[in-house]
Amino acid sequence: MPYPVTGPSPSPSPVPAAPARRGVLRGSLAASAALALGGAGLAAPAFALSGRPRAAWGVQTGDVTASSGLVWVRSDRPARMVVETSATESFRRARRHRGPLLGAGTDFTGTTALRGLPAGEQIHYRVTLADPDDPRRTGEPVTGTFRTAPDRRRDGVRFLWSGDIAGQGWGINPDIGGFRAYDEMRRLDPDFFLCSGDAIYADGVIEPSVTLPDGRIWRNVTTPEKSKVAETLDEYRGNFRYNLLDHNVRAFNARVPSIVQWDDHEVRNNWYPGQILDDPRYTEKDVDVLAARAARAFGEYTPVSTLHLPGGRGRVHRVVRYGPLLDVFVLDMRSYRNPNSPNRQADDTTGILGAEQLAWLKRELAASTAVWKVLAADMPIGLVVPDGAADFEAIAQGDPGAPLGRELQIAELLRFVKHRRITGTLWLTADVHYTSAQHYAPERAAFKDFAPFWEFVSGPLAAGGFPANALDGTFGPERVFVRAPERANLSPMESPQYFGEVDIDGHSGDLTVRLRAEGGKVLFSKVLRPGRVGQ
């Protein structure tokens, strides 16, 4: 079943032309966390009633297209959100966009939708928070910028992807500069960032310190909401706020728009609809209750265009159309899946996507005119991801024969792509906490009615590293490249963090995938040619 997100609908407003494209804390670490936000915005909104509204958590943009985008902010108290956009950093001839009232019902967060944007241009924006009872009392504006998608093929597209943030107990470490990979990604100046899920670890406790095997001490910024597993709405909200304590994340958000999906850790590890927990850490055992709370917090803290559809029909899966070269198909492999099991059933119409989402995906793929069609999956296809001793978490289950269980749904989708001659499909994911490239081909597979395709894995962005998973031969994967630790849960001080880059050339249409390690090194590169079925 889906978990729609409730909340205020974004407020549309006109936008002018823009210039040319590309122009409280605990322990000894309280002071570090205060420094992360410049000493501002740490008090709970209910107790910060004096002065003017503040936006100390920064700004974000999301789901940017050639003509639209969402701007997000959080206030420290009730406020009216006002967004101004301009073609220049001076905000000369700025246009004003009246946003929503921010209040306790959404944890003082809100989004404003910008429509009618010029394609392929740099948009400068600033967000001002105004006292709802006295509009003249305003806080200090917070600024950001983003590029809209091009409407001309020759302009090209370049974006980054990764996932898995603040996981396995590895949080914001001021000794190493916090989440450093965000700074590195910002300096690459991508058009957007695809967050492939596990944007938070709601089930991951952050301790003040961890002793590494070599005796070094990892120190964490900590907060009350990260001292236990998240169960209440406020605890889920606090997990999203935790990441925003990091100055690298806030600086990145102010310059790079995101396309965000969710996976399991936004709720808890390996969750599925209908699950009843046998976990002493949780007083609430019904995962559906937890998922509804988590989804609400996700919608409050993430600028996603489909989360506030009329009639409570909010959903994560969607298509973000990024000009003539690229459509991004954002999948939701959580909300509609069947229970984790040995995954060997001979008939499975629910699978990992659900029948309705699969039908939607087929329609949208068939209708797409983009040169490249990225399938943004929150879990891999042919990598075996176990859930306990006998059950499986993803699609594969280690049986290299004909499709069974959730593989049946993927086989149906791959067959559809082949027979409808849909060109330029490419799978991107994170989830498994290492980086790799898999090529799938029917001549190596038990199931043969599909066209060859590539799947690229890149992560974690700020979490523990893990050894490579086994491959399942049903769809004939060949691991062309892998970089993974030899032991489980290596800290970011012991193993580099990973993210991927996709660069589409506007003249040739060639798509280059680069798997990158933190520190600037390109580990693997692959050029794909346009116009091929599957890939």
Image (tube, helix red, strand yellow):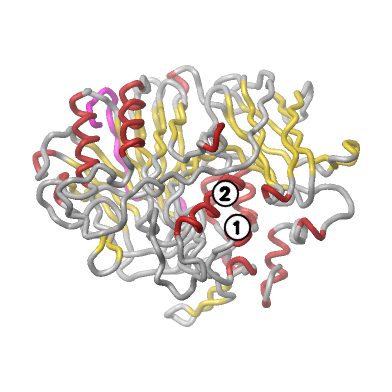
Marking on residue 90: none
Please give the name of the residue rendered at 48% of the width and 73% of the height, measured from the top-left corner.
281
- Give x and y (percent) for residue 13: 69, 24
Q: Amino acid at mark 2?
A: Arg
Which comes before the other along the chain, label 2 or label 1? 1
Left or right placement of residue 514 versus residue 529 in this view: right
Asked if labels 1 and 2 touch by Cβ distance under 8 angstroms, the answer is yes
**Residue 392 occupies which quadrant of the picture?**
bottom left
Reply yes or no: does residue 532 show up in magenta. Answer: yes
**Residue 246 visible here:** no
Note whether 301 is above or below 433 in the view shown. Answer: above
Screen quadrant of the C terminus: top left
Q: For marks 2 and 1, give the CA distance.
A: 8 Å
For the record, the magenta segment spans 519-535
Reply yes or no: does residue 49 show up in magenta. Answer: no
**Residue 10 occupies which quadrant of the picture?**
top right
Question: What residue is disc 1 on?
Answer: 233
- Give x and y (percent) for residue 98: 75, 30
**Residue 255 occupies which quadrant of the picture?**
top right
**Residue 436 visible here:** yes
At mark 1, the secondary structure is helix
Please give the name of the residue rendered at 24% of the width and 35% of the height, measured from the top-left corner.
413
Foreground residue among 449 and 492: 449
Question: What residue is disc 2 on?
Answer: 296
Please give the name of the residue rendered at 72% of the width and 62% of the height, measured from the top-left corner.
35
Note whether 461 is above or below 138 in the view shown. Answer: below
- Give x and y (percent) for residue 485: 33, 65
Foreground residue among 43 and 489: 43
Q: What number of labels is visible?
A: 2
- Give x and y (percent) for residue 238: 62, 59
